[in-house]
Structures are given as C-alpha cells and as structure tokens.
C-alpha cells in the first residue's frame, strides 16, 4: 500500500465472483475486519449482509482494499462515494445505509421495527422479565454461589479496581445523586424481613471482635455529637441530617 493512511475502504465478495456484497471502512487490517464480521454473523445478528455471510464458506469470502483516506472525515466520504458508485453500476450490495461515519441513511419504518421485534422475541440473550424470564422463580445452588464468590474474590480490590485512586471530579460518580424515588424503594426493600440482618443477633465472639477493633478509637457518644464532629467542625451540610437542617433553620 505504501501510504500513510487513517483507514481504508474495503469490499467483501466471493473469491469466485467480481460483484461486491458489502462495502465498509476500517482502520484495521482488512483480514482482521473480515474475521470480526464472521464473528458477528455467528452471534446471530440479523441483517442482509450477516444473513448472507452465514451461508458462505469462510475460505471463499475475501475483502479487497478499494481506497485509502488520511482522515476520518475523508474515510466516511469515500465510503459514501463507493457505495453510491457501485449501486449505480448495479452491484448487489447488502449495505443497509448510504455509508459514512455513523448510521447515515437508515431510517427505520414501523414495519422494520415490528419485524425486528418479532425476530428478537425468544432469542437467547434478549432481556425478558417476570414469568417470561427463563430463570424466573429459580435460585442458584449454594455450591455455585460459593464457586463464583471464590473466583471473584479480590478481583476489584486495590489497584485492580478501575476507580482506584480516583476522588472528587475524577471519580465517575462525582456529582451524581440517587433519585429520591430510588432511595425510597431501596429503603422499603431493606425494612423488616427485607433486611439481611432481620432477626439476627451477633454472637458473643463477634461482639468481642468488634469491641477489640474499636477499642481506643474515639467514638461519638450520640447522634448530636457525631453531627458536631463530622458536620459542624468540618463545615459540611447534609440534607439528610436532622441537626444540619435544624441548625440551618435557626440561622435563617
């Protein structure tokens, strides 16, 4: 190829034919992109191109480099031009869109949406809820749960955690607050028998361990004391703290 490129335009066809069935763009080597197409086809995705690809012998399908581009914008423009040119020439392309960067040219009609819904109904991996879910009413065995627990133990601890060392604006949850409706529902779920510790009491051994761990650590003697230590003294205002709210009301 001998060019400094940002990507290429490629055409997919059968080795024994000269008509292209699909035009695409990629920044990867075309053999790798073709293997990715076969992988998607095996996953069961329903499009004219993948339906055609599933019927073909892997060794009989090839991809040709048709054009080069030095920027994403030129790459998208080149794909549009190639699809338009080959369609004008009568080539049996299976592209759903007119090409370009992003889903340009494809407008779903109500009929297309209904057909997609019917195809997806009952397909493995599609979300189903309530009694329609295949696992509805069932639970995993204690052995399976223990196995998963052992496999995942320590997976997201320390530096293995993708958010390790991220604070303030650097943390993905910074500035986000749980909606009041979600907070209310969680509260209701965890009340009474919904609380995992409902009806349980700590054993004498556990209580002794907790006492030993906390020994010598300054602990608030009351909620008011905790408010003073962690809110007033640090200049923190919490809407969920009754004392913060009371103090704010008195100041106004």
Image: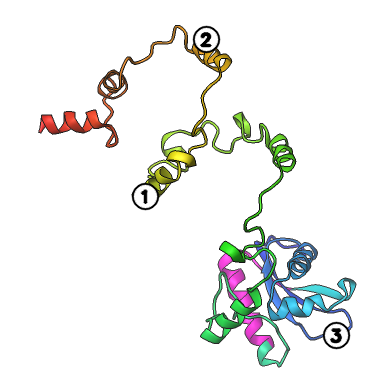
Q: Quadrant of residue 117?
A: bottom right
Tell me the crowding category of disc 3: few under 14, some 14 to 19, or many 20 or more residues within 10 angstroms, Cα based: few
Between label 2 and label 3, give the one nearer the viewer. 2
In this view, the residue in front, 140 or 79, is 140
Give the residues in magenta: 66-86
Between label 1 and label 3, give the one nearer the viewer. 1
Q: Position of residue 189 (x, y in %)?
A: 45, 45
Q: Which quadrant holds the N terminus?
A: bottom right
**Residues tagged 2 and 1 counted as in contact (Cβ below 8 A):** no
Q: Quadrant of residue 11?
A: bottom right
Q: Which one is earlier in the sequence, the residue at label 1 or at label 3?
A: 3
Q: Secondary structure at mark 2?
A: helix
Q: Residue at x 52, y 31 (%)?
A: 165
52 inside magenta stretch: no
Q: State whether residue 128 appears in this view.
A: no
Q: Position of residue 10 (x, y in %)?
A: 73, 73
Q: Is residue 121 left or right of residue 56?
A: left
Q: Secondary structure at mark 3?
A: loop
In this view, the residue in front, 113 or 33, is 113
Q: Position of residue 224 (x, y in %)?
A: 26, 21
Q: Residue at x 73, y 89 (%)?
A: 91
Q: Quadrant of residue 115?
A: bottom right
Q: Which mark is residue 179?
A: 1
Q: Report the residue marked by disc 2.
A: 212
Tell me the crowding category of disc 2: few under 14, some 14 to 19, or many 20 or more residues within 10 angstroms, Cα based: few
Q: CA distance from mark 2 to mark 1?
A: 38 Å
In this view, the residue in front, 137 or 221, is 137
């Amino acid at each position: 190829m001998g060019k400094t490129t940002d990507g290429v335009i490629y055409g997919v066809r059968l080795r024994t034919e000269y008509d292209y069935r699909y035009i695409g763009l990629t920044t990867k080597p075309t053999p790798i992109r073709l293997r990715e197409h076969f992988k998607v086809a095996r996953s069961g995705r329903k499009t004219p191109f993948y339906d055609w690809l599933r019927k073909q012998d892997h060794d009989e399908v090839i991809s040709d480099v048709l054009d080069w581009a030095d920027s994403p914008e030129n790459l998208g423009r080149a794909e549009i031009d190639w699809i338009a040119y080959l369609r004008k020439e009568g080539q049996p392309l299976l592209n759903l869109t007119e090409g370009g960067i992003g889903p340009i040219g494809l407008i779903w009609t109500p009929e297309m949406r209904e057909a997609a819904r019917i195809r997806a109904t009952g397909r493995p991996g599609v979300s189903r809820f309530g009694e329609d879910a295949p696992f509805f009413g069932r639970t995993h065995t204690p052995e399976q749960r223990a196995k998963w627990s052992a496999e995942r133990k320590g997976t997201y601890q320390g530096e293995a955690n993708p958010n390790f060392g991220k604070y303030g604006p650097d943390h993905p949850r910074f500035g986000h607050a749980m909606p009041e409706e979600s907070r209310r529902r969680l509260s209701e779920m965890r009340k009474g028998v919904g609380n995992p510790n409902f009806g349980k009491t700590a054993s004498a051994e556990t209580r002794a361990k907790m006492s030993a761990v906390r020994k010598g650590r300054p602990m608030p003697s009351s909620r008011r004391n905790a408010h003073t230590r962690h809110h007033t003294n640090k200049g923190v205002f919490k809407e969920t703290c009754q004392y913060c709210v009371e103090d704010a009301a008195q100041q106004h």
